[in-house]
Image (cartoon, rainbow, N blue to C red):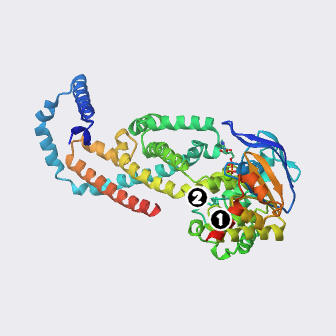
Amino acid sequence: MISFEHVSKTYPNGVKGLKDINLTIGDGEFVSIIGLSGAGKSTLLRAVNRLIDITEGEITVNGVSVTKAGKKQLREIRRHIGMISQNFNLVKRSTVQKNVLSGRLGYYSTIKSILGLFSKEDYERTREALESVGLLDRLHTRSDELSGGQQQRVSIARTLVQQADVILADEPVASLDPITSRKILSDLQKINREMGKTILVNIHSVEMAKAFSTRIIAMKSGEVVFDGTPEELDGEALTRIYGRNILEEKEEEADET
Amino acid sequence: MKLKDTIHYNWYKHLFVVFLLLVCVLGSAALTEADFSEVFENADQIGIFMGRLAHPDFSYIPDILDPMVKTLKMSVVGTVIGVLFAVPFAFLATTTVTRNPVVTGIIRFFLDIIRTIPNLLLAALLVAVIGIGEATGVLTIAVFTFGMVSQLIYESIETIDYGPIEAAESVGANKVQIAVWAVAPQILAQIASYTFYAFEVNVRASTVLGYVGAGGIGVVLNSSLALLKYERVSIIILTILVVVAIVDTLSEMIRRRLA
Ligand SMILES: Nc1ncnc2c1ncn2[C@@H]1O[C@H](COP(=O)(O)OP(=O)(O)O)[C@@H](O)[C@H]1O
Ligand SMILES: [Mg+2]
């Protein structure tokens, strides 16, 4: 369970990224966070594993305070939170295997990880993770030789070997074509349903958010302006979020053509 | 077409620069009391010298092979030691991994100082401290390499892709793990390339280190010059030229492969 209590973030330049956010996200939810660029979606997501320090309030993950965690505790918390991003964040010159295996770094001492002394189980976990995203045959391929969609699946595999209970995905499909995007999101959905992992995903497409998630949160200027099921996200709610009903506009466009 | 429409529209600035250069050259010549006529008066000396240089003493080759190999060895060992020390310092000289601007500031200041010491002066200092010999040469080369390569590496570190750092951070990796797993693979090829580049520079530089007593071919060159054995000087210079050319070519080939 992830909870936000009166969370605010003011960037050093005075911009308010988050304003008094109160949220509780239960285990096994698939939450899509929508909203315009600059609404605060990335800030919200990156506050969860403290890639960004919040300025007010408290965030807890499974009852443990992320906000108050010391260095060592934070490492421990981060092990259980996977992260994927728009840019995949792979070491492009390294092989797929190395990139996936790096998801285990939080479990190893410095010296063991420098020498590459990973356990047999972790090599096995790597194989399993790659198998579940359909890339087992690419174990020794250099990551930059893969397509965007494949690279994103490698980064999903990395969160799997990490054995994270929570996966944060910051616009994971923003740089991919619609068909690949749907494949990636259904991979995440499968992970959510079959492994019971909690998923928080920032996404631009309202349609995809509606199609894949169990809950949708909309943000505007650092505030939560909608929180409900995909069914509840109707035209009126969309107008509140975007200033107009973007889904209807799309339908009209489709009618015209 | 008017002058101001051409690339020469700044002509008065260019003229001023030329004028400034002239003033500098003539001014410094006057200050140091340099007399260019001396150069021409000693022309016959040059003639004699060149004449003997043109007759390299090939029979001397066996005697210079050993010091030449020593020079190469000194370069290899010095380069490797220098690079080994340069890598961790390069990491400390950027905030990329440490996120600590204070450490970065101190380390950069230290590296800047190391780099300002001229090679020969460093060798002379070390000869004074450690004494004459190859070890001094190796140390000189190591320090010189350290200064040069650490800067090249930290500049590379600053241009890497930060995505993998964030990824490593988010799985709970510590700073050393981030350096080794997220940063190092991105700059490894460049480090290898810099190492060969440093080796090239060092082979060239180390040939003269013997001059101040730091071992290698420079010692032989120095003594031959002092004994006015220009035929030997000639063959030594030839040997150095050939070796440097070979090293440069090989190293460049390898570096192109690495890129
Ligand atoms: N490092 C930063 N420094 C200052 N302002 C920032 C920084 N990161 C984001 N912001 C600002 O905070 C707001 C929210 O940004 P972000 O969370 O990235 O939005 P989103 O992901 O929804 O596009 C924006 O106004 C953005 O300009
Ligand atoms: Mg964003």
Q: Which mark is residue B185?
A: 2
Q: Is residue B72 left or right of residue B174?
A: left
Q: Is residue A248 left or right of residue B209?
A: right
Using a 10 Å C-alpha cutoff, classify the residue at mark 2 as few (fewer than 14 neighbours), some (14 to 19) or many (20 or more).
some
Residue at x 60% of width, y 63% of height? A94
Residue B140 rendering spot, x and y as whole percentages = 45, 42
Residue B150 shows in this picture = yes
Same subunit under labels 1 and 2? no
Q: Amino acid at mark 1?
A: Lys
Q: Quadrant of the N terminus of chain A?
A: bottom right
Residue A68 rendering spot, x and y as whole percentages = 82, 42
Residue B221 rendering spot, x and y as whole percentages = 29, 45
Is ligand 2 less than 8 Å from the beta carbon at label 1?
Answer: no
Q: Chain of mark 1?
A: A
Q: Which mark is residue A186?
A: none
Residue at x 59% of width, y 55% of height? B184
Q: Which residue is mark 1?
A: A98
Is B109 in front, or is A159? Answer: A159
